[in-house]
Every structure is written in structure tokens, then in C-alpha cells.
Amino acid sequence: MNIYKNPFAIRASERIETDEMFLELFSSEPLVHLEEKNDQGKLWGCVTSILSSPGAGKTTLLRLFSPSILQRITERNSAYKKLKKLDVIDSERIKKCGVYLQLGRDYEFLEDDALFNEVEQKRVFLSLLNARIVLATLKSCMSLAGIKYTALDQITYSPEELVPEFGDFKAEFTGKELLDWAAEQERRICEFLDSFVMPDEGIQGSNSLFALKAMKASWFTYKGERLCDEFIFQIDDGHKLTKKQKKTIREEAVELRLPVTLWIAERLETLSTTDILSDKNIKDRDDQTIHLENAKKGIFNPMVKNISTLRSAFSTDGIILASALASDTTINYKALYNEASKKYQSQLEKLHNYENYQECVAAINTQDPYERVLNMRALLMHASRQGSGGVMNLFGYTAQDLEWIAGPLMPMVKEVMPGEIAKLPQYYGFSTLIDLASQNVEQFLDLSAKMYELLVAKKISDPSHYVLTAEEQDGIIREFANNRLEDIKRLPRGNKIYGFLMHLIDFCREVTFTPSYSYRSVTGFAVKEENSGKWGKDGFWFQEEANDELSTILKDCLSYNFLMKQGITQGKKDQKWTIFYLNSWLCAYAHLPLERGGWRPLTLHKLNSWL
Amino acid sequence: MNKRWESYVMYHQNQELVKFWKEYYQDKPDAKVLFLLGKGFDPRMNNILKLFLENNPGRKLDCVAFDFPSEKDPEENQKLYEINTKKLDALKELYGFGYEVLTIDGILPWDKRIAMMCRKVIDKDLSEYNDVILDVSSLPRAFYFNIAKALFKKMEGDKKKNLFFAVSENVDIDEQIKKTPVNENIEPLVGFRSMSSREANLDRINILISLMGEQNIDILRSIYNHFQPSDMFPVLPFPSKDPRHSDYLMLKYHDFFTEKQFTEPQNITYADEQNPFELYRIVSNMIQAHQATFKPISDHVCFGIALLTSKLLSLGALLIGLEYNKCVAIYNVSSTNYEIEDAGKFEQINQTSEPFLLWITGEAYNEN
């Protein structure tokens, strides 16, 4: 599919090729996180971790601050006002500009115990990081100055303090000289990384992360003009660093209180099991954290609606996704309804209090199939909820009672029934599509792209009628869920994660699809022992050795966004529970209603038995 | 421009290999051979060693086996591993060759396992050997690419010693082994990253050469997204045993090509499915032509080679990686686990495996 035909198929920001296109498609809601920090006076001059599972928009957020984007932004763009308020730009110039550094796995490789001791490992790591920060800064300077690398000697670097690491004790360097210095540092380390043996000339290590301090924006000029006031150092894919390396950066930047703005974007998987499972995690860290997926529905829903509008407008076919998704089915599933009615009736007949409902059943059986199945399900729900000991209604219910019996239960019947009747479309409509995104932009785009692809094809075959039917949407969603599930197996510990989720899904189905539907849609669980008082103030169930494997699997599930964590206060003594909810696409796989909230406590014994 | 393997020596099928060895060793009664192989569950593990020993019974030979034990392997794989090990022991018993196992901890991350293994190869004293045969049949690509590189670096200047790569090819066995590729965080293969990892090459131009094969479309997508090429050149296997193989592959990757707006049919190239040297020659031509064309605007043209193809054709990519190591980045996708659909069939299917022997360095090329 041509990307302009299907703008939803362009997923992550690094894959949106042109800056103009990026700006057209950028939705400014995630800037709310930065605005909050800015209001608290904690955005500039400090280290900020930007955390999320893959696809939640970390790189997109960082890219907005790249010089080429900032140069192109105008009042027309939704982010303009917000950037101005953040003091990143004013009407004439760029004041703060991103220096973007994407990490690879090569840093991890430097932690080679066979060749280096711990001190050397740190020195080599810092050396490579310093070189790459210098290179990234030069790239930003080139972009700000609008020059190619061949003109780097026109950029002047005049440090107000001596920077001994650059070798010559000079008051002034050209951009080209800095490039040569950094290229040489990088070359030696990369050659080692590619050959596994130390180069004869050795590797020059660094004692500190001096580049963050040395790459001061005010020390760079082009033709005598300053390029910008301040750099925002951005380290993307921070999860590719080892624990020790992350600690080194933290020590260098946070503890030494370097007066620089450093944003480190990393995946949740980078956190320790305790960090990710405990609620006190992020707050207690020295640096500050933005968790992109912690956005409230108030932010996420308008954001994806906005993304949908922007992308639809970018399509050559003029199809507006939100209005091209049918929000109801037009097919009458008579046969399915009849079959389901019979099934519900036979379940009802097995109940001890069936006699009370016989008159109602007789009345229902004269109704149309759709009405019949709804009322029969409502009756089953009502009868089941009378309790097994059951208070017998001596006179039974009459046909006239049916309305007050079924009426209040009808919303729940409509909620549960599509999941109980196979082949009935269950997930359709634009609001359902947003719910299915589970607070993850990429997930929204993945699903939308598939919908849009079919829309484009339908429009070609019939330009006047191309709305996606409920059945088509449901089919796409189910196929998506099935494929995603298979992908889980590819992850490290994938088979274990898959197995655990399958058990959880079976459990959720079992407690959701009961005749009484008492718990409504159960899509989550909490650890039953959490409030047992067994663990003290600073201890948690997941810190016990016996629960190691379970903790790791739960951590993985949270990192990859298969499960979502939510803290709630509930119970007799205002007990605090951590609920692990299934991601919406897993609910779709399990045919569970998407209405959030239902959960059950589960014992550690049971959870461990699922591994 | 010259190519190292412009002229090449390659043998395939049992009869040809046997004939070559007979002629070759006729005048070399004292030549000692070092045979390197990977210990694993693949039934092809012992094929070439067995063929060699059966046809060169008195030959002085040492065997080095790379072993990557992992308790996580499925039970079925472990059983097959045991069977192969027993067969190797039987060969050892029968022919009495020197034997050394280089064990690499399977718990270590891939990159560290590779580094450890390569250092062992680099440290290996090859002075007593006349010929070194690296059999890649049961070695994962990430490993044999780096073992081959280490051996090649050690031997390329020595005109008296001969380096051979061997593989027992069997598409049916490959199909029986279900791999679970990890396409998260794709990066070029360690040891073959070259300039792709250098941030200092500010004028770098990336060209993707994708060797098309039966891999998942998502893998190519991940490689493309990581490498961010300016242009792409798919190489399809033709001539091939199934003459429509290329057509099927084009259909398979159709969505990807349209998504990336790939509309240049002249970029598509074909290489013989059974001749890695032919693939090497075609890709070498591409590399040299691109370097010449881009010379006025960039000294840093980086060629990403996406390995989606068979083990045999991967050897062609290996030759490219060895010769153009400074400008080629090899993208290989590791698998988390290997599941065997029907292990019972393995023995029978293995009967139809075809051996290939590629002469890489040494006497055959002394005139080049």
C-alpha cells in the first residue's frame, strides 16, 4: 500500500521520512507531560527519563525537538504554541534544540569481562559515549547552520574553559577538528567491536562524561552568530545500555549535578522487576520520570482522535477513518440468535428456580429472534443471581414482570452476549478502536492501518459505498489479535509469557462468561496475598525468591504492554491493590467485553502454577 | 575492478567431492586436515565429515567441534543432539582422529558467545595443518560467519594453507526446522557491522541488498527500518530447483515492496540458487558500481546485506562480508528457539542432502 494512500501504515516517527510529513502528522498532546514538568520548574537543566513500552511515542516526542523540525514549524502547526510556551522557540529563532543520539547494542558489548576490568569498561564506555555526543552535537549544529559536513570548518567552537580531552590546549576549534577527534575515538572502539581483539594502538578511555558539559550551545558559532541558546541532549533507546552503564550516566549527570538538560528515552523493560512491579518505583528515583502510558484517558483519547484526523487528511483518497467505521451491524443473525436462545433456555431450565420463570419463557418464545435472545439472556442472568439456596418466589413471575426483570439487566446483556455467541461481531466502531489501542499509539496505528487498507480497496471497487461493516472490522481485529499472539513467542521467554497469558485468558473467560455475569467482564487480577500483612513496609511478594519467575514474567508482560498495571483502593479497610489488566487486544482474542474494571484476586500458588 | 573470487573452485554432490579429494590428496600423503563443525541437533552435522573420512581413511585429521549447550533446548532437540553426538563418537572410534570440543556457554548473550568463540579460533595454532575445512551445516549463521572471518584473517596471506567452507544443503530439512526469529532490536551481525555503526561518517549513503528467501516479511521490514537505506536491490534465487521460486517470493514480499514504494524493476537481480560464488560475483559488481558512482559525493557507501536466504547462498553473502568487510553490514536475524516438526523424518530426508565444498584461500588462488 502506497504510504500516501494509507498514512496509518507509517508507524514510528523514525520511519516518517520527511520533516514536513512528520509535522503534518504530529499530534501535540504528549507535550502535556513536558508542560507539567515545565510548570514545576523541573524540565530544563536536569535529567529526565522518558519511559514507555515500545510504540508509545518516545522517539516521536524527541524528534519534535530536532533542529530540522524546529526550523520548519510554523503557527499553523498544533505544537507551535506549546513549544513557544516551553521557551523552545520564539517567533524569530530556535532557543533550545535537540542533540539526538540513538544507542545501539555496541555499548553493551563493551562490558567485556574477558578483556577489561570494571574501571576500564567504564572508561571505554565513556569514551565512546563522549565521542558520539560530540558527533551528535555537530550534526545538530550543521542542521542549525544549514550546511553540509564538508563546511564544518566554518563552525567555530570557542570553549570558555579548557577542554583537555580534545588534546590540543587551544582556545578555539573548528567543527572539522572536533569531527576528526570524535571520529578517531569512535574508529578505535568500533574496530575493536568488529574484531574482538584490542587494537595495537589501544583504546583511549575517558574518566568522565565531559562531552555533556563541553558541548555548550553558547560556545558554538557559525559566521560569528550563535546557533542556539541551549542544547537538549537526547539519548534514545537507553534500554540498550547495561545496568552499570546506566548507573554511570546517572552518576555523571545527576549526582555531579551537571547543568545540562538530558532526556533518556527507554523502554519499561529496562526497569528492575521491583521497580516495575512496585508502585513507589519511579517517584523515588533521583532523576525525574515521564511515563508516557500513564496518560489519562483525557489525554490519550483526544490524542488518537487527533492523530486519526491528521492522518486521514494526509491520505490521497480522502477517506476519514473515524466516519468510515460502521458503529452497528446491519445483518440480522436470526439463526445465531435462535440457537443462542435455545442454549440460554436450556441453561435456565437446569436452574432450581426455573419454575418461577416458565411464564416469562413462554412469553419470550413468541418474540422476534433478537428480542428473544436478549430477554432470554436477561432471564438467565436474573435467575442465576437469585442464589443457589435461592429465595423462592411462591407465585412465580408473570409475563408482565418480564419488563422490570429484563430492563435493568439489558446493558449487561448487550455487553456479554456478543462474546458468548460465536460468529457475532463484537468489536466495531471508532470508539472501540480507541479502546483497543490500550493507551499505545503504535497499537492504534497498527489496527487503523489494517482498517484503512481495506477502506481504500473498498473505495476503489465502489467509490460511493465504502464504509467498513461491523463484521469487517471485527474480522480485522481478530486476525490482528491472533497474529500478535504468535509474535509473543518470538520474545525472550516468549513461550513462558504466552503460556501464562493463555492461562490468564482462560481464567478471565471462565469467570466472565457465567450465567449470572456477576463479576461482569473480568479482564484483570490482583495478588490475593498482597494485603495479607505477610510483607512489611519495604517488602513485596515479588521480592521473594519463590516468586522470582512469576515476577519476571509479569515484568515482561508489563514491559511489552501485554498487561497494564493500575493501583486501586478497595475493600473493608481501604486496602490497596495492584491490578494487572489484560491489554485490550488480548481481550479481543478472548472475546471478552472491553468494559474495564472487573478483576479477581488470585493466590500466588495459582499464579505460579500457570508458569 | 578485481574480485578475489572472480575465478573460483567449488564442488558439489558426493561424487564430485570424492573425486576431488582423491585427486587432491594423491600427491599429499602427509597433509594434515583440521575439520571444524558445530555440535547440534541438525542431522547434517556429520554428513561431510563422514564422507571425508570414508574416502580418505588414512588421512591425518583433527576435528574441532563447537558446542553451545543450553538447557533451554526442547527435549526433542536434545535427543537429536545426543544421536548426532553418538554418531560423531562412532566416527571417532572408527577412524581415530584428534578431537577437541570448544564449549561456549549458551546462557551468554549472542554477541558475547560469538566474541568468546572467535577468540578461541584466533588463538588456535594452525601451523601443523595443511587444510582447514569449516563445515557450517549445523552452525548458526551468526557463529559461522564469525568463525569463517577469524579463519580467513588468519589464513588469507598464507599461500600454502588451504581454507575450505563446506555445507550439506537440504531445503527439506530447513523447512522441518521451525525457527522463531527475534525481529525486535535488529542490528547488523557483530563482526560485520563495519561503517554502519560509525556515527562519524556524516556523508554515509546506505544501500540495501536483500537476499530474498523464505523468511518472515516482518524481518525484512525490521531490517529496512533499522538500516534506513536510500535504495534497495532485491536478489532473487534463479535459476532454482523450483523455476517459480522467485515468483513466489515476489508475491510473498509484495506488501513490503509496495509499502516502501519500491517501483524499480531494474533493481531486481537474480543469482543461481546453488552457487554462492555466483551470488558473490553479482553483489560484488553492484558494490563496485555503486562505489564508483557515488565517489564524487560520498566516500562512505554502506551496503546492508539482508540474509533472508538459504544456508548455501548465505555463504555467498559471507564471501562478500569477508572481501568488503569495511563497507558491508550483514543483517542476520537470530532465532530464540528451533522447533522440529517431525524429527522422525529427519533421518530419511537427510539421505537427500547434497554436500558443497567451496575453496576459499590457498593453492587454488596462488596465481590470482
Image (cartoon, grey):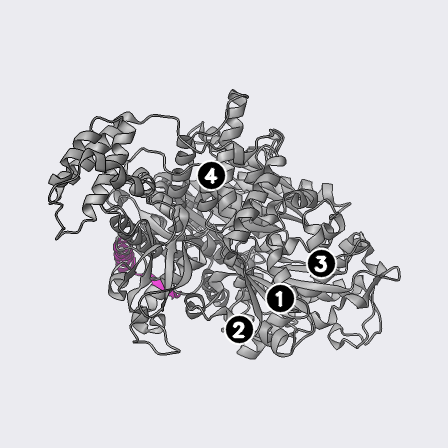
- Viewer-proximal residue, B137 or B214? B214
Residue A189 bears which disc, if any?
1
Amino acid type at circle 2 is: Arg
Relative image position of residue A489 (x, y in whole percent)? 37, 51
CA gap between label 1 and label 2 equals 32 Å
Check disc 3 and give the amino acid type. Lys
**Dots 4 and 3: beta carbons under 8 Å?**
no
Q: Chain of mark 1?
A: A
Q: Chain of mark 3?
A: A
Left or right of A565? Residue A194 is right
Q: Earlier in the sequence, mark 3 or mark 2?
A: 3
Of the two numbered discs 1 and 3 on the same chain, state the one appearing first in sequence. 3
Q: Of the residues tagged 1 and 2, which is closer to the observer?
A: 2
In the rendered image, residue B104, in percent from the top left (x then y), is placed at 40, 65
Badge 4 element: loop
User: Callout 3: 10 Å neighbours few (<14), some, many (20+)?
Assistant: few
Which image quarter: residue A224? bottom right
Q: Are marks 1 and 2 in contact (CB under 8 Å)?
A: no
Residue type (three-letter) at the residue carrying disc 4? Gly
